[in-house]
Image (tube, rainbow, N blue to C red):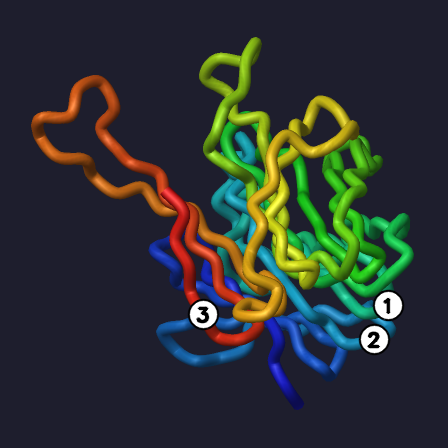
Amino acid sequence: LKVNGIEFSPFNGGKYLCSGSFDKTVRLWDVETSKSLHVFNGHEDIIWCVDISPLQSNNKNDKRNNIGVIGGNGYTICSGSFDNTIRIWDIETTKQFNVFKKHEGEIRSVKYGSNELLNTILSGSNDRSVRLWDIRSRQQIQVFNGHTSIVLSVEYSPFVIKNNIGNSNVICSGSSDSTIRFWDIRSNKNELYMIKGDKIADNGICCLKFVGLKKKKDTKNVAYDLNLYYGSIKGRIRIWG
């Protein structure tokens, strides 16, 4: 059946791959051998998106786990489904670690945070909302409303706004309403900024990616330019810098 989402592991040089499918399963694969290491069952409808956590625990135990690999490290997989849930799977125990149920529509995008936000998950849904979740407390932190149609993509932004120097506190979301909206994770009030795409030429924002490009040698202070790339339903790729 159709595979909707794949993600390479941010550890071990991308040796592992997880996938989500129309068959309602999440699978973990060994890229080098092409073998399935484990099948995670629990979703009640198709799986649209997956991600693998960058988190490593302080557990220095080198014992092998139920899968026989990556033991004692605290890595998890998250998956978003058309059953309106986000589920977190513990790679070490191969068990479901948690399930988030507050979305009122199908889940279209999930993303783990990193650095100071490594214990969070970001999600976008057919219910037009963007939500931020705390993995440790197993609670919803914020819900961001403003999109007028399905939220198809979410991303943690590298941008920092005032009073939080050095720590990223901005997220962004792309929607079939042809807008990209930026939000302050500390507040669920109106968005910080909105990029309006071309409703006719784009017909919606499918995916987002921030890319850092090296600046010219004569540029002072900042070593990189940050550009936002997005892909549209109509097939165009656009760059904002």
Quarter of the picture holding the C terminus = top left
Q: Can residue 28 be seen in this view?
A: no
Residue on which the image places disc 1: 83
Amino acid bearing label 3: Arg
Which sits in the foreground, 212 or 227?
A: 227
Label 3, label 1: how many angstroms apart (C-alpha)? 30 Å
**Disc with the residue nearer the chain's start (2 vs 1):** 2
Determine the secondary structure under disc 3.
loop
Cβ atoms under marks 2 and 3 closer than 8 Å: no
Label 2, label 1: how many angstroms apart (C-alpha)? 5 Å
Q: Quadrant of residue 84?
A: bottom right
Which sits in the foreground, 232 or 95?
A: 232
Cβ atoms under marks 3 and 1 closer than 8 Å: no
Which sits in the foreground, 200 or 187?
A: 200
Amino acid bearing label 2: Asp
**Disc with the residue nearer the chain's start (3 vs 1):** 1
Instruction: Count every numbered label the image shows and give the total.
Output: 3
Cβ atoms under marks 2 and 1 closer than 8 Å: yes
Quarter of the picture holding the N terminus = bottom right
Which label belongs to residue 45?
2
Which one is closest to the eye, mark 2 or mark 3? Answer: 3
Residue on which the image places disc 3: 236
Give percent across and percent down for residue 67: 58, 64
